[in-house]
Image (cartoon, grey):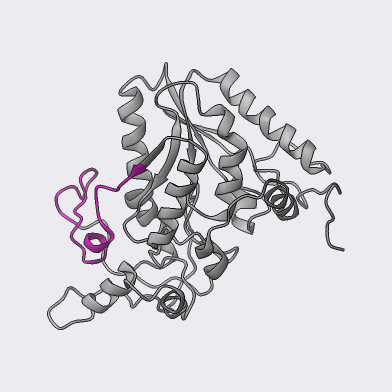
Amino acid sequence: MPMLPGMPDAVAGRPAKASARPPLRTLDQAIARSHDIIAQALDRYPIVARQALVSGGNDSMVLLHLVRPYLDSSHHDAVVHVNTGIGIDDTRQHVRDTAAAWNLPLRELHPRDSYEDLVLGQVIARTGPNAGIRAVWKGFPGPAGHSVMYRRLKNEPLQRNRAAIIGTHGRSQKVLYLAGMRWDESDRRFRTAAEIDPDGGIIWCSPLAHWTNAQMREYRDRHLIPRNPVAEHLHMSGECLCGAYAKPGELDEIAFFYPRPPTPSAAWKSRSSRPGSRPASGAWPHPAATSPSPAASPDGCALPARPPWPDRPT
């Protein structure tokens, strides 16, 4: 039975990181719970900056609309968008336009290492036993490579952003990252998402964790949240096209809606297949042999509930 506005709804089952099975809630009750979660994080930790992580997808715009009143505590408070360098320009522009329309400061972060260099095996490990010796990755990633792509393209700029705010004072000062992860989003998020997740100088907070898909739709309709045409066309935000969880034919689908300029993933697929180029570990995308163990991502990459094919060898 389809959910109607005002009807209570709940995530089915008990998520792995929830203290109890989420109860039935109307949208207004779900909103109240979201504010309670944020209040708990602010009361529990010495937060010196509040930032909303926005991928540009439709879910992240609901998050941003909900948390706007909290982004006024310091000059560090802002909307944060990680420009991975391999996203669709329309998504980045959607984030910029929405932040401007809602009169919110925007920080657009960029990774130190490029996707191009990662694919071509030109990013050498800087720490650990392989420091200065081995590439951290080479070739187009399968699901097992998602953790490398996430760390290099998204987490690294977020960590640098945190360091720029609090430096070495991670024990006495924290940055609150408000993210849009939800238990109802996928099987994977059902297992991994937490309402509040401290990580050194960063406090990850997912105030929408308990929201159902029906509640997200109701909120968007109630508040006329601007939708990203990229998400409407591709069913993902389009801000990270690393290919780790791509489905067969995905590049063709992207090119159908966004043919010019070509996606960086498509461009480097072409370059890596030229004579004399560094060989990739597999074509993008290309099926192969073993099952992956994907790492967590706070927001953005297209993460289906189950990988569309097994991982490829590296």
Quarter of image, res 89 = bottom left
Quarter of image, res 179 = top right
Q: Quadrant of the N terminus?
A: bottom right
Q: In percent of the image, x 42 and y 58: which residue is there?
A: 239
Image coordinates for residue 54, horizontal then vertical, percent: 49, 46
Q: Nearer the viewer, residue 90 or 145?
A: 90
Image coordinates for residue 302, horizontal then vertical, percent: 50, 61
Q: Nearer the viewer, residue 145 or 159?
A: 159
Counting every numbered tag in the picture gives: 0
Q: Is residue 273 visible?
A: yes
Q: Quadrant of the C terminus?
A: bottom left
Q: In percent of the image, x 41 and y 54: which residue is there?
A: 93
Is 281 on the left or on the right of 36, as rendered? left
Q: In percent of the image, x 33 and y 76: which residue is there?
A: 282
**Magenta stretch, residue numbers:** 108-134
Q: In percent of the image, x 33 and y 43: which residue is there?
A: 156
Image coordinates for residue 63, horizontal then vertical, percent: 59, 43
Q: Residue lying at the far left in this picture: please name it.
A: 276
- Find out whether residue 285 is within the magenta segment: no
- Find out whether residue 117 is within the magenta segment: yes
Image coordinates for residue 18, horizontal then vertical, percent: 69, 39
Is 160 on the left or on the right of 182, as rendered? left
Is 189 on the left or on the right of 243, as rendered? right
